[in-house]
Image (cartoon, rainbow, N blue to C red):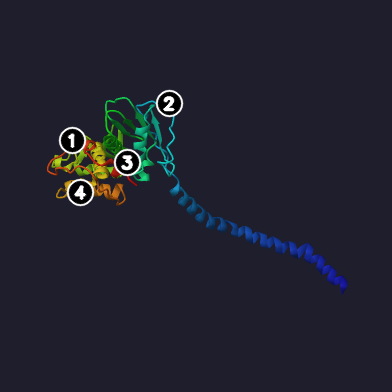
Amino acid sequence: MQKIMALNGKLYRKWFLPRVLGAIALAILSLLPLIVLAFPVNKFAANAVKSEILPAPAIKHEKSILDFGNKPVAFAPEYFALAASFEINKDSDLDHCEEIVSKAMLKLPSEHTAALTAINLTGKKMERRGYGGYGSIDLQCVNLDDAELVGVLVHEMGHIVDIDYLTGGYTAASAFIDFDRYIPADDASVDFYSISWVNSGRRAKETSKMDFVSIYAMTDPFEDFAETYAMYVLHGDQFKRMAAGNSALQEKYDFMKYDVFFGQEFNGSGQRLNTSARIYDSTKVKFSLDKFLEV
């Protein structure tokens, strides 16, 4: 009996067990393609979600017209509680100008200032008081008072928001072109331009000067945007008065409120404007700089 059991044990180990294990292995191998097909679906889905939240490729910005050797100037800690996304480059002896600019930038949404890479301050008179767009602002710090300086700064920030913050995808080109750069049709700014403009150089036929916040805003769609931005930030209450009864200005006010400033409104604290006329330049309108800069 013991011999028979021993023989059966040998047969079990040498013949039956290997065949059973082999059959199990073959069964697993036969199911493997189904497992491979099942699990990559979730893997690809996870990768798709990740790709949606990756930052977009950086846009190559045009070089500033001012040359500071790309030497950044550190922000004073009392003015910036959070790290800024841009540099301030300056000529010597422009500490006061830098202080005013730094304080004013804190009054704008961080989403707007994040589209900026550099502010270049100069103590020399430029052909224009400021230039803005494609990531940088050049600002003249002489021959203008602090309120006008901030007015020019906010106007140039309007260009930054227009060109660098409100951007479309790589879709068909719109009728609007800035220098040699076509504005994509799905760029949010196109909705603003189209209120008063047919293309970059032609206003809509029914448009009048009363549909703009200033005479300078009538220059082209981009100056229209920048002037409207500055008027909204620095003279919001007067902008509201101007928009009352004017559908084009009301559209522009609403665009700034909902598409640019996420519902935030600015009251303004300055010169009362004649709503039946238009000033030439929003940066010349008087306002209380202390009230604008107060925390």
**Is residue 146 something that shows in the picture?**
yes
How crowded pointer 2 is (Cα within 10 Å; few <14, some 14-19, many 20+) is rated as few
The answer to which of marks 2 and 4 sits earlier in the sequence is 2
Q: Position of residue 119 (x, y in %)?
A: 37, 34
Residue 167's tag is none
Q: Position of residue 74 (x, y in %)?
A: 44, 35
Quadrant for residue 291, please give it: top left
Residue at the spot of label 1: 280
- What amino acid does circle 1 point to? Tyr
- What amino acid does circle 4 point to? Lys
Residue at the spot of label 3: 161
How crowded pointer 1 is (Cα within 10 Å; few <14, some 14-19, many 20+) is rated as some
The answer to which of marks 1 and 3 sits earlier in the sequence is 3
Which structural element holds mark 2?
loop
Give me the C-alpha separation between circle 2 and circle 3.
25 Å
Which structural element holds mark 1?
loop
Give me the C-alpha separation between circle 2 and circle 1.
36 Å
Q: Taking 205 as reference, is 116 left or right?
A: right
**Is residue 185 something that shows in the picture?**
no
Q: Position of residue 97 (x, y in %)?
A: 34, 33
**Residue drawn at (26%, 39%) of the image:** 226
Give me the C-alpha separation between circle 1 and circle 3.
22 Å
